[in-house]
Image (spheres, helix red, strand yellow):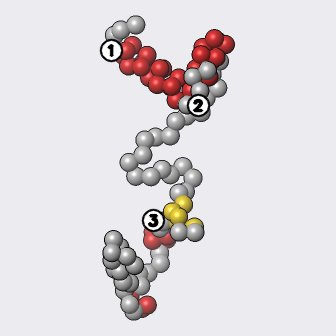
Amino acid sequence: MSANRPDTGPIWTDPDDAPELTDEWFAGATVHKGGVVKRLPGKRGRGRKPAKESVTLRLDPEVLAFFRNTGPGWQTRLNEALKGFVSETSKGRH
């Protein structure tokens, strides 16, 4: 216990007061391993954006070389450039 984390104590003290362990209870349970919350496959944290989709894409060598030469994070920059194009195109600009 520290000054920033007050001791909240147990939620209940009598084991007979424990909730019934139903299938619904287990379905809503949070899985912990080593003190860390484990997410189930396909589940993302609250407020997280949808996961990006992995695709195979054929690019001209000079386009690929340009983005790779910008260093780590080149795939993110390529994605941002494509999002910018989509945004401009959807506004009626080409």
Q: In this view, does 73 lie above or below 45?
A: above
Q: Distance between the residues labelled 3 and 1?
A: 43 Å
- Front one among 24 and 45: 45
Q: Identify the residue shown where x is 62% and y is 22%.
A: 68
Q: Which of marks 3 and 2 is nearer the N terminus?
A: 3
Q: Is residue 44 left or right of residue 93?
A: right
Q: Which residue position holds label 3?
A: 28
Q: Identify the residue shown where x is 45% and y is 65%.
A: 28
Whether residue 12 is visible: yes
Q: Is residue 40 left or right of residue 80?
A: right
Q: Which residue position holds label 2?
A: 72
Residue 60 image offset from top left, x and y in percent? 64, 12
Q: Which part of the image, by quadrant, shows the N terminus?
A: bottom left
Residue 30 image offset from top left, x and y in percent? 48, 66
Q: Residue 91 carries which label?
A: 1
Q: Identify the residue shown where x is 51% and y is 63%.
A: 37
Q: Is residue 18 above or below residue 26?
A: below
Q: Is residue 33 above or below residue 63?
A: below
Residue at the front extreme of this rendering: 3
- Mark closer to the observer (1, 2): 2
